Image: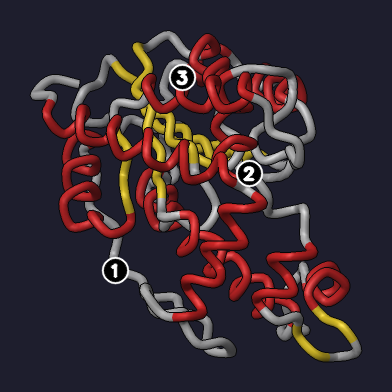
Amino acid sequence: MKIRRWVGQLFPHRPDQTIFYLHLPKTGGTSIARALTSNRRNSLLVSEKAETKQQVINRLDSIPPRARQNIRYVAGHRVFTELQYLFPWKPVFATSIRHPIDLYVSLYNFWIDLALDPGHEHYQRNQEMMMRNSTPLSLFDWLESSDEWLHMYARVLARAESGPEAPGIPLPNVSQDNIDNAKRFLKRCDFILEVTQSQVDIPRFCNFCGIAPPRKRSRVSIKHAVVPSGSTTWKNAETIIQKRSESDFEIYAFALECRKTSLQSNDV
């Protein structure tokens, strides 16, 4: 696990607060995380794989307390609520969400792309995961056979809120406690950015943080066509995802309600 750290004199719009941004995969969060850490002076990027939260905390404990006091932005896949206690400022939590079908189709295309890119560091892993006899798995074969992608929202958001595991560790058997913890984290969030509402959500969030909005990115798989919303393929994928990972739809719907509440709030 690597944690990149930069400490400097630049501060967000509200210097008495620290921004914690949990980056869920395939929700447009890469651009947000890059924007938060772009000055490379007062930011912390926590994205490398860690099995437990304690592994992350142990690494952060190695940063001198006086240096930690200057950190105003914490972003990445491994952000969780307990991190707030390492910093002296009031926490502001944020995350991004996306419709479950869009999320999993994007994840499928992304993993296939890596499996077809010999120059990528995860080429071999994705070859084994996404290829059969030198041919990419179809979307439906992947949806039916894979357990690694199940319950994305529960496994990331619930583990950001409670438990010893770091966010993102596989959670094939989701419980009601997992769903409840995911909802607790969402209720904790001051900002919930939704991909289709990025024109509203991203400028609002970046303005609060005192950073420039990220440049627009349109990374679409060049090896696989996008699945149009409402198409037969889309509807078939939705049926499989609802059958195998129903919690994603429940948590996503709850997140939309939390987003609506945060948009109505004048003060964060």
Specify the amino acid type for callout 1.
Lys
In percent of width and height, residue 132 lies at 87, 83
- Residue 76's place in the image compared with 113, above or below, is above
Q: Nearer the viewer, residue 236 or 72?
A: 236
In percent of width and height, residue 174 lies at 69, 33
Q: In front of the other: label 3 or label 1?
A: 3
For the residue labelled by badge 1, is the local secondary structure a helix, a strand or a loop? loop
The C terminus, quarter of image: top left
For the residue labelled by badge 3, is the local secondary structure a helix, a strand or a loop? helix
Report the side of 118 relative to 180 (left or right): right
- Neighbours of disc 2 within 10 Å: few (<14), some (14-19), many (20+): many
- Residue 25's place in the image compared with 170, above or below, is below
Give residue 184's mark. 3
Q: Mark 2 = which residue?
A: 151
Query: Residue 260's quadrant in the figure?
Result: top left
Query: Does the CB distance between marks 3 and 2 fall below 8 Å?
Result: no
Look at 56% across and 39% down and name the residue there: 247
Real-space CA distance between mark 3 and mark 1, rounded to the nearest whole angstrom: 31 Å
- Residue 203's place in the image compared with 87, above or below, is below
Give residue 216's mark. 1
Specify the amino acid type for callout 2.
His
Q: In front of the other: label 2 or label 1?
A: 2
In percent of width and height, residue 79 lies at 55, 31
- Residue 56's place in the image compared with 253, above or below, is above
- Neighbours of disc 3 within 10 Å: few (<14), some (14-19), many (20+): some
Query: Does the CB distance between marks 2 and 1 fall below 8 Å?
Result: no
